[in-house]
Structures are given as structure tokens and as C-alpha cells.
Amino acid sequence: MHETLEDHLAAWATNDLRRDAALTLTALAGAARDLGRLLARLPFTPDLVAATADKGGEVQKRIDQEAQRIVRAALAQAPVAAMLSEEEDEPIALRTGAPLLVAVDPLDGSSNAGVNAPVGMVFSLLPAKPAPSLAEAFLQRGDAQLAAGLVLFGPALELALTWGEGTHRFALDPETSTFRHAAGPLAIPEGRREYAINAANYRHWPAPVRAYVDDCVAGPRGRAITTTTCAGTAR
């Protein structure tokens, strides 16, 4: 069994594009490790959670900017042509001619950081394809993704990652500073009775999405569904 993240990626990287993706995922894992160290120091650096700007109706904190800096620096060393970040209005060009694009939210839920609640990082890897503009290069079908993942900064620093062969869970071993395989492939058990969604965006959803959520609320086929509603900011 492949124990470390590097072992898993080495076994998966059977062609050039996958090898480039593996290098990029390793860079993102390194950024997550660095950001985790920074978050661990928040009790001693409270100014990191102070508001510094209002971007697009959202308050941006210094910790958001630091997370952006850490991720950008990591991706600049990887085979990535451009990154599209939640913290920027436009994509950022990195390496001309590189084969990959990365869409990322460097620190999702940064408002939680000041109270020591979990925060995360979300990312997606796409092949770089010719397009009229850098922004349009990111407008690809979901099945074009090479890999995607979520980092959770909580009691443990964990990475949930998929490269098209199920979803695997890795956790940072603080003694070795390496991500080790914790579980996988993961799957949602059949018959679950709970869902979570950002209801603030209800009015923007397509009719089929509204119908599905309305059915969950009503209790389809007589089965009660527990609603875990996320009342986030509508976009």
C-alpha cells in the first residue's frame, strides 16, 4: 500500500500530463503545510484576522492575502500557466507555455480563523488549452479536471484528493511533516438523510436544483431529510 501522498502520486503519474499534475499537487500540499503553520500562530498574531479591504462586497482579511501569497508562490514553482483565485478579480499568469491551470480558493471560511474554527482550501487542476483570453481558458467542463481537492485546517491538517480514481484522505503527520494516507477510496453511504447547501443563493439556482432541494425539504417518498442549511453570502 502507498503510504504517503508522494507514493500515491508517483504510482498515478504514468504520463507527462499526470507527472505535471503530480508536481502541482505536491506544490499545493506544501502550500497547505506552510499555511497550516501560519494559522497555528493566529493566537499570537491577531492582526492577521483584521479586515484590510472590501473586495466585491466581501471583507478581505490579511490572512486571506497571506494565503494567496503562499499558494501563488508554490504554484509559481510548478508547471502551471495561470491560477484563478477567489482572492483576485482576474486570473494570474504564472509560467508561459506550462500545461496546467489551477483554480483555487486559498482560504475558504477565513472568518472562522479568528475563533479557531476549521477553515479550508479548495482547488481544481485543469489542462491549459488555447482560448481567446486567460479567463476563458478556465471555462471547461467538469470532466476535464485532472484532479481536485480540499484541505481542511482543523484538529488535524487533512487533504481530501481525487485524481479520477475515487477520493482519498491524507493527513499531515506532524512528526515527519509528510501527508500520509488515512483512508480511501471514500464514498457517501447509501440512504443518507442529510444535506447541506448555501440557501442564500436559492433565487439564483436553476429550476432543477430548486426542485431537488424543495423535495428534500418536503421529505420525498415520505422520508424525512435533515436540513443542514449554510446561510452564506449570496453571489
Image (cartoon, grey):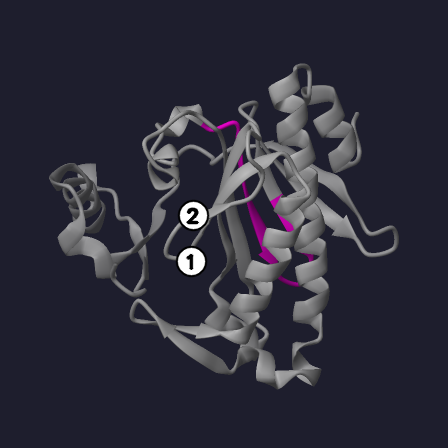
Q: Residue at x 54, y 53 (%)?
A: 121
- Given the image, on which type of amino acid does mark 2 rest? Pro
Give x and y (percent) for residue 42: 65, 77
**10 Å neighbourhood of mark 2: few (<14), some, or many (≥20)?**
many
The spot of residue 152 in percent (x, y) is 59, 55
| Closer to us: 16 or 201 | 16
Q: Quadrant of residue 119?
A: bottom right
Q: What secondary structure do most residues of the magenta stretch adopt?
A: strand
Query: Is 55 placed left or right of 43 in the picture?
Result: left
In magenta stretch: residue 212? no
Residue 179 relative to residue 161: left or right: right
Disc 2 to disc 1, how far (Cα)? 7 Å
Inspect the image, locate mark 1, and give the three-letter code of the amino acid beneath it.
Answer: Glu
Q: Contact (CB < 8 A) between labels 2 and 1?
A: yes
Magenta stretch: give its range. 145-159
Which residue is disc 2 drawn over?
Answer: 91
What element does badge 2 sit on?
loop
Above-or-below relation of 201 to 192: below
Q: Residue at x 68, y 24 (%)?
A: 19
Q: Is residue 147 above or below residue 216?
A: above
Could you tell me which residue is drawn at 66 percent across and 49 percent down? 74
Where residue 155 appears, as percent x and y from the top left, is 67, 63
- Which residue is at a point 28% across and 48% down the rendered structure image? 225
Residue at the far right in the pictured view: 175
Badge 1 crowding class, 10 Å Cα cut-off, few under 14, some 14 to 19, many 20 or more, is some
Q: For the residue labelled by badge 1, is the local secondary structure a helix, a strand or a loop?
A: loop
Give the labeled residue for mark 1. Answer: 88
Q: Is residue 198 left or right of residue 52?
A: left
Q: Quadrant of the C terminus?
A: bottom left
In the rendered image, residue 146 lying in the magenta stretch gets the answer: yes
